[in-house]
Image (cartoon, grey):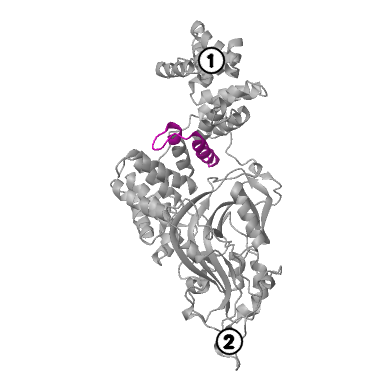
Amino acid sequence: MLSLPAGLALASCGGATPGEQVRPKDQTFAGAMGEASSGPCREPESGAEPLVVDWKPEQRGDLEVLMKDSVAVVAYSCQGFKLLKDCKVDGKYGFLGMTKKEQLVRLNNADEVKANLPLAGAGIAANLGAEMQRGATLDVALVMIGKVKTTWGNVAADELVGECDGATHFVKGATVGAFVMETGARGEAKTAAQLFGAGGSGASSSTKSVRNQDGDLADCAKAQPDSAKAPAQCQAIVRLELKGIRPKGAKDAAPTEKAAPPPEAKVADVATPEAACPKGLVLAEGKCTDPSAAPAFLCKPGDAKECLAQCDKGHAGSCGAAGALFASGGGGASKDEAKARELLGKGCDGDDVKSCSNLGLLLVNARGGAKDAAGAVKRFEKACGEADALGCGLLGSAYESGDGVSKDEKQAVTYLQKGCEGGHEASCGVVGKMLLEGRGATKDVAKATDFLKRACDGGQARSCVELGELYDGGSKDVPKNAVAAKLLYQRACFGGVARGCTGQGRLELGQGGNQDAAKRAFDMACMRLDDLGCAAQKVLFGGTRNVIPKVPELMAMQKACTAGSMRDCAAAGTLQAAAGQKALATPSLDRACAAGDPLACAVKKK
């Protein structure tokens, strides 16, 4: 997996040719991994996408082990880069395949080396400094066959687990495949295949280089976009996607007593790009570089003027970024969804996959022009085939609803699952619910639980409630766990879902709970017009809101109660008690309290 030639033959006899003069001196990879640093210190942005092709085998192994069981965390600043092996986020990564892509990235100077290889780049740049000034380069050939991603979109410092001093970013995702890194020269024209040794006819026999390689081209050729995992010898992590950790306590604030009921869920908005390079550098041709050295580059995500300028120079990603800004009316752009369609079309035609997903979103929702659901599906298909999780999720939603394509719940599950594996949290929530109900696939509670967990990690509050109810009720597939259920309910309540507040209040009434916390939770539920929350608030804490149970909902609860759901027995009894129907409430409350339901027992005492 790792090839490190100890020594390479010098050119045969004769004086130094012009090609020899720009060719780098012999280096060992170990020598290039020095600790010396020089040049400007460039602070990374909150987001970053560094290459990791310079890592030592043991460092790569540590990262791979961490990413198998949890979300990895790093310390990253202009002073250096460190993987925090004893720090993590409770979560997991999924895999989403894509059409195999090859790319040759040439790092031409010390600044580029340090910016793109933050772990060992400073040491490599120091060791190759004089050679790079004479024309040496550091060449990286990449073969990319898929991405691994977590649904965690935001992580606060108090959500980290373990020894996390210095933590700045978490690993949102990674591109996987195979790579070769070796020193080269600006005078040489190389291809990715030549660096891998697959097409050496154009390579100079006298080339001196140090090779660092992971992954096998032949195995990468077996990868397919629909593969559930990467081939065994094509799983090397080649590039990370980092996202900044928010300060402690920076989670969404709890609602106050003056909070209004949450608005109805909005139609999904367009996805916007994030910063990928240290401050002062731009992303172009697969690397972070000085803007003066790039004919066209990815613009700053929130600068519509720069995005338009770079779009005019032919950068597809900048066209997509400009389109996203015109769709939302941000970054100095007036909201103009027709203009957004035009720009996103340029981005999609230029193979910027985010542009394809965003354009499809506008087309299917008749934003900026007439509705074109069939056209949207074509864009979603293109994006999904290139590992864009949003595109996969939107394609799955199209199959679920039959909008722009024949309704097919089996296909919906397939694409929603791909979206979830690619890190699209909303897809996780939808496919988790479908698997719970046995729609589009055989009912699978264990798998549904995993998807709901990922959705909840990604901030889908309703999925937190649904997962909490699974732990609350318990079953042969999901062991009863009141502590986990209460935490999930609380998370949903903070996310604005009234049912989560009611669930939290209910469990706060039980063993290990807190009466004040229960009252606050029921208050928040009632503010959001949850009937059961208002009923509990009235019976237990003297609330004044009138409670009139809705007949269909009450009948559904009583039916579930008869079938053995003690949570529904308690809910039905509480609603009836709040409505003054004590005689009707008593049997349900007695039954639920006898089974240990905390809400039923608390209401029964009143």
Report x, y in % for residue 400. 36, 39
Magenta extent: 434-459
Marking on residue 20: 2
Asked whether, in this view, residue 276 is left or right of residue 367, the answer is right
Residue 356 sits inside the magenta stretch: no
Name the element at disc 2.
helix
Q: Position of residue 505 (x, y in %)?
A: 59, 24
What residue sits 37% from the left and 58% below the top? 348
Report if residue 386 is visible in the image.
yes
**Amino acid carrying mark 2 in the image:** Glu
| Res 135 → quadrant | bottom right
Image disc number at residue 574: none
Rate crowding at label 1 as few (under 14), some (14 to 19) or many (20 or more) other CA atoms within 10 Å: few
Identify the residue under disc 1.
544
**For marks 2 and 1 on the same chain, the one whose residue lies earlier in the sequence:** 2
Q: Residue most toward the top?
A: 583
**Considering depth in this image, is 120 or 563 the residue closer to the camera?**
563
Give the residue type at disc 1: Thr
Query: In the drawing, does residue 232 fall left or right of residue 399?
Result: right
* Residue for point 66% across, 23% down: 514
Nearer the observer: mark 2 or 1; the answer is 2
Q: Position of residue 472 (x, y in %)?
A: 56, 26
